[in-house]
Amino acid sequence: MTTVASPLLGLALPIQGELSGTWGDVVNNSITSLLETAVAGITTLSTDADVTLSTTNFVANQARAAILACTGARTALRTITAPAQSKVYFITNATTGGYDVKLVGAGPTTGVTIGAGRSAVIGGNGADFILLAGATITSPTGSLTGTFGTTAQRDASPAAGYIRGNSSTNAMEWYNGASWATVGGGATGAGTDTAFVENDCVVTTSYTLGQGALVAGVTVTIASPAVCTLTNHGFVAGQQIRFSTTGALPTGLDASAAYYVIAAGLTASTFEVSTTYAGTAVTTTGTQSGVHSVGKIKNAESAGPLTVLDSTTVTIPSGASWSIV
């Protein structure tokens, strides 16, 4: 019998009675050195192309390294294919160009995407790679980096405690086990006090209440009833919402009107609306154009006195209110 390779790392497994006079070379070159690479070695990937990691036995290869360092310029998302087996990688995306890299198992598997400028610890369980840890810092005195995306890009099946930045609302949010909620306080004060909620005394820029709650990309069918689709919209039955568009809404919907979400047809990604609470679903006809947006009706409160400049307007959508106290 001759030396065979270990199934995961491709290390030498000498057979008793062989390697007379050469066992030292085999142990040093095909076991110890390769094991060191598996624990602390680095594979640098600088090519602007998809890469399949080499997997040779008994000698150095790319897949065995503990660290995958992605460097150099990228012109698109690039995929790194590793053996579909148990293995932990620390991967850094230090590429330029602003593109993600993706680690998948041979097959390919679903894999894990690592954003530009970020690092992650990724583990292979034999079936796929999963994210084990992904929080990074910009510097020892800088910022903790996290996830940032639109409302539509929220996790499809979130768990309580998830936290992310929402680019649609420009706010941090967390999942409380039932719905997404905005994170933040806003009160200020001297020392450790948080007793004062302050606002400016002059409105210098035109604003529409609830403007930050609008999410672009909702689609509306021309049908009876009209079905609206927006991934992970977060609406509940009875909630008041409004629409806006860069073009024209279909006949039956009006950007100046408030609507109620109804229970009929309500899923995580679809909803129907009525002009009255728990009423009949809206029917749409005609044609439509542009990109449509939808969002919750928002009320506002400001501390007065408050001056709105002559060239400035504050728009209060139907269903909303603004109180100055």
Image (tube, rainbow, N blue to C red):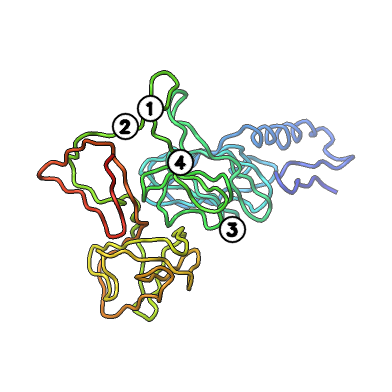
Q: Residue 150 at x, y = what percent? A: 40, 52
N-term-proximal mark, 3 vs 4: 3
N-term-proximal mark, 2 vs 3: 3
Q: Give the foreground label among 3 and 1.
A: 1
Residue located at (82% from left, 41% from top)? 14
Residue 197 in the figure: left or right of residue 108: left
In terms of depth relative to the viewer, which is nearer, 50 or 100? 100
Determine whether the residue tagged by mark 2 lies in a helix, strand or loop. Answer: loop
Q: Which residue is mark 3?
A: 109
In terms of depth relative to the viewer, which is nearer, 307 or 128? 307
Residue 270, above or below 181? below
Determine whether the residue tagged by mark 4 lies in a helix, strand or loop. Answer: loop
- Label 4 amino acid? Val
- Label 3 amino acid? Thr
Residue located at (89% from left, 40% from top)? 16
N-term-proximal mark, 4 vs 2: 4
Asked whether the residues under the numbered discs 1 and 2 touch, taking CB atoms below 8 Å apart as contact, a structural biologist would say: yes
Q: Which residue is mark 1?
A: 188
